[in-house]
């Protein structure tokens, strides 16, 4: 039970950090002088962070 509670707390903190800190920071970054490949790679940060949260949720519930 303690492991499940720790997983819920970790998942909650991850969602808050990604939605309140990471995504706004990525969206507000000035990329006007960057090349196309740099902008595309920088845009993957949001996708990878959300995939990490989904993986963590699946791992917590024993799906993965």
Image (cartoon, helix red, strand yellow):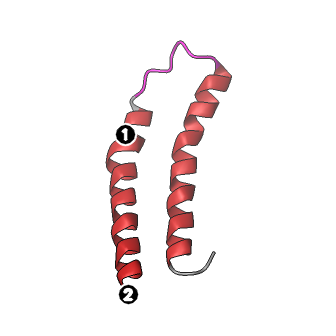
Q: Farthest residue to the front: give it.
A: 2
Q: Farthest residue to the right: give it.
A: 37
**Observer-nearest residue: 51 or 36?**
51
Q: Residues within 10 Å of mark 2 (few under 14, many from 20)?
A: few
Residue depicted at x 62% and y 24%: 38
Residue depicted at x 63% and y 75%: 64
Q: Which label is found at residue 1?
A: 2
In the figure, residue 7 lies in which quadrant? bottom left
Residue depicted at x 59% and y 27%: 39
Q: Which residue is mark 1?
A: 24
Instruction: State the SS at label 1.
Output: helix
In the figure, residue 42 lies in which quadrant? top right
- The location of residue 50, given as percent across then percent down, is 51, 55
Residue depicted at x 63% and y 17%: 35
Q: Which of the image's four quarters has the N terminus? A: bottom left
Q: Farthest residue to the bottom: give it.
A: 1
Instruction: State the SS at label 2.
Output: loop
Q: Residues within 10 Å of mark 1 (few under 14, many from 20)?
A: few
Q: Which label is found at residue 53?
A: none
- The location of residue 45, given as percent across then percent down, is 54, 41
Per the rendered image, the range of residues in magenta is 29-35
> Reading the chain from its start, which is encountered first: label 2 or label 1?
2
Residue 43 on the magenta segment: no
Left or right of 8 on screen, residue 63: right
Residue 39 to residue 56: above or below: above
Residue 23 to residue 36: above or below: below
**Observer-nearest residue: 2 or 46?**
2
Residue 62 to residue 21: above or below: below
Using the numbered discs, state the Cα–Cα distance from disc 2 to disc 1 in whole angstroms: 34 Å
- The location of residue 31, given as percent across then percent down, is 50, 21
């Amino acid at each position: 039970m303690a492991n499940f509670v720790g997983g819920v707390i970790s998942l909650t903190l991850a969602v808050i950090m990604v939605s309140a800190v990471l995504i706004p920071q990525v969206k507000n970054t000035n990329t006007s002088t960057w090349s196309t490949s740099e902008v595309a790679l920088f845009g993957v940060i949001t996708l990878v962070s959300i995939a990490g949260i989904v993986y963590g949720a699946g791992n917590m519930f024993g799906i993965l």
